[in-house]
Structure formats: structure tokens, C-alpha cells
Image (cartoon, rainbow, N blue to C red):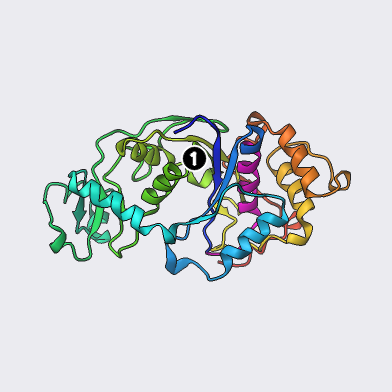
């Protein structure tokens, strides 16, 4: 992997861009551009049943409206299956991955953490109906330095964080797992810096362990606060967050910068989104980003819909 900075924004086309995802997009863009790096966009549509037709185009249009122009072509995970399967086949052939027939109920009976039950059963491919494929993992999960949140220790109170369990690479329903494809795609695209929301910080030690088990160098990670309408209730498609309004793009950029903790000029001081982004790039400093996992956004300051779940 080369030393030139390569970052990315990887939305799921299961809903339109909302303010919380715009925060992540802007933060990852600014970090890349302030380091004279490339900024890529990838559609994480591996879980195709949850994706909505046409939403990918809406997301790309929203990014363009906010001046967030990506480098290189947008890749779609749904079009990468052959590449994922080739890696999976190699791992199985090398006995580094194996078939697992355990159900969710069985894993729940293991105190919620898979205990390697099928690791040495040598289940053959011909027997692998309704099977997951798991990666053999033998390392403890390790702390890491987050370039925004500083030192991050694995949360040993949560399942799957005290040690690296044999992680699922392909699910029982035949879909490739996020923890496999996100890593294969970052390696494929030579991504070496990942700036994303704090909702993913707890899974980062596991993902770093998967990188190392597969023989790859993990990227540098930085996590920014997530926007929430109530404690523990981040803005999301499931929580009915309103789509971002592209007609107020300049105001949205200013709001994002204020949200992240920067003393940013008012929208009236800029000619448009490009001048605002250029100013944001010039003042970007990871140390100035608010070091908190989530920020509650007051209803009267937001366009979010926080109706009942």
C-alpha cells in the first residue's frame, strides 16, 4: 500500500443522506483534502434486501450539491461478489476459514459469543446448507490510537469485543458479511485513512484484528461524534431522520462545522459551498473536533423528524 493519503465515504443506499451522514461525509472529505489526499465514495450495498432502488443516485446528488466531489469511480459492493468469493475460497482452501452450522439460538446459549463450536468439525462444502463461513481468529483484541478520540480500549463489557471470536465472513443467508467486504474493499481501493462516526468505534478493534488475520495493515482510524435526537438514539434511517435539504447546502456545511466544534463563519460570508469548503479545509484540525461519542441536537435547531419509533 502506498503512503499517499486515501480516504473514503461509504454510505449504504438504504435511505437518503441525512444530517448525521453529512457530518461523516464532510469530516472524511476535509481530513483527506487537508492532507492533499484522495477522497473516494463507495456504495455499501452488500445487504441488497435493505437497499432502495435509486437512493444511490440521491446520495451522489446530495454530495455534489454540497461540493463534495469524489476522486475515481464509485464502486458498488453488489458488483464485487466474484472478488469476495475468490478470497473466501482461498481462505477455505488454506483451512483459515471454515463452515459453521450454529444458529443464532445456539450462539445465544453460548452467552452471546460464538465459542468456536464448528472450528474443528471439518464440515464439507457439500454439507454446507444454511451454513455461515467463519474466519479462524486467535488474537486478543487490542487498543488503538484514534486520531480524533485518542486511545480506544476494547469494551470488554460487550460481546465480540473482549477477544476476537471467529468472525463471520459469509452469513447463513448467503450474503457476504460487512466485516469482510469493508476490509477487502478498503484494501482493494488502497484506503489507508478512515474517518467515520463513533457508532462504529466499538467494532473497530475487531475489524483491525480481521485486517491483521488476513495479512493486511489496518488503516488509520478517526471517529467523529454522531448526531442524536436523544441519548443512544442517533440520527438514522430507522429513526426517521429527515433527508438533507440540498437547497440549503451552504447552511448545512456551516452547521456541520459548528456541530464538529469549529468556530466557523456564518453562511453570509461565503460565495457558495466551494468557498466554504475551501475555508473548512484550511482550518481543519483533528484536535479541534469535539471528543464526545454523540451530540444531542435540539429539536428547534434541526430539520430532523423525531417521531415515535
Q: Residue furthest front?
A: 72
Characterize the magenta stretch by its predominant secondary structure: helix
Give coordinates of residue 64: x percent, y percent: 69, 55
Corner quadrant of residue 127: bottom left
Describe residue 303's horizontal placement relative to residue 113 as left or right.
right
Name the element at disc 1: loop
Q: Quadrant of residue 241?
A: bottom right
Identify whether 244 is placed above or below 209: below
Q: Residue furthest bottom?
A: 53
Residue located 55% across and 31% down the image = 147
Which residue does the numbered mark 1 point to in the structure image? 191
Q: Nearer the viewer, residue 233 or 23?
A: 23
On screen, residue 177 versus residue 220, left or right, reads left
Q: Which residues are magenta?
A: 14-31
Q: Position of residue 45 (x, y in %)?
A: 47, 60
Residue 228 location in percent, x, y? 61, 52
Give me the residue at 19% from left, 54% from top: 99
**Magenta-colored stretch includes residue 9:** no
Q: Please tell me whether residue 164 is drawn above or below residue 18 in the rendered image.
A: above
Q: Is residue 240 visible?
A: no
Which residue is painted at 66% across and 64% down in the image?
Answer: 305
Amino acid at each position: 500500500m502506498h503512503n499517499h493519503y486515501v480516504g473514503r465515504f461509504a454510505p449504504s443506499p438504504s435511505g437518503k443522506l441525512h444530517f448525521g451522514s453529512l457530518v461523516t461525509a464532510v469530516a472524511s472529505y476535509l481530513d483527506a483534502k487537508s492532507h492533499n489526499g484522495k477522497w473516494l465514495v463507495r456504495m455499501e450495498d452488500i445487504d441488497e434486501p435493505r437497499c432502495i432502488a435509486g437512493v444511490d443516485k440521491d446520495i451522489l446528488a446530495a454530495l455534489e450539491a454540497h461540493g463534495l466531489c469524489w476522486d475515481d469511480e464509485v464502486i458498488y459492493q453488489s458488483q464485487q461478489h466474484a472478488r469476495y468469493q475468490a478470497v473466501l475460497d482461498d481462505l477455505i482452501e488454506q483451512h483459515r476459514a471454515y463452515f459453521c452450522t450454529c444458529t443464532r439460538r445456539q450462539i445465544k446459549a453460548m452467552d452471546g459469543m460464538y465459542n468456536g463450536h464448528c472450528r474443528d468439525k471439518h464440515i464439507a462444502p457439500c454439507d454446507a446448507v444454511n451454513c455461515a463461513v467463519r474466519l479462524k481468529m486467535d488474537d486478543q483484541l487490542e487498543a488503538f490510537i484514534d486520531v480524533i478520540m485518542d486511545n480506544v480500549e476494547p469494551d470488554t463489557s460487550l460481546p465480540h469485543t473482549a477477544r476476537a471470536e471467529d468472525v463471520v465472513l459469509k452469513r447463513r443467508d448467503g450474503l457476504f458479511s460487512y466485516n469482510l467486504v469493508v476490509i477487502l474493499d478498503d484494501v482493494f481501493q488502497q484506503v489507508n485513512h478512515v474517518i467515520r462516526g463513533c457508532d462504529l468505534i466499538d467494532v473497530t478493534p475487531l475489524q483491525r484484528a480481521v485486517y491483521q488475520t488476513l495479512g493486511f495493515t489496518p488503516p488509520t482510524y478517526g471517529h467523529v461524534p454522531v448526531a442524536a435526537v436523544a441519548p443512544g438514539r442517533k440520527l438514522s434511517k430507522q429513526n426517521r431522520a429527515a433527508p438533507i435539504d440540498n437547497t440549503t447546502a451552504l447552511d448545512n456545511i456551516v452547521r456541520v462545522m459548528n456541530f464538529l466544534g469549529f468556530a466557523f463563519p456564518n453562511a453570509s460570508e461565503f460565495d457558495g459551498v466551494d468557498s466554504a469548503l475551501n475555508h473548512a479545509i484550511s482550518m481543519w484540525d483533528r484536535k479541534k473536533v469535539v471528543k464526545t461519542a454523540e451530540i444531542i441536537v435540539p429539536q428547534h435547531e434541526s430539520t430532523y423528524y423525531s417521531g415515535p419509533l
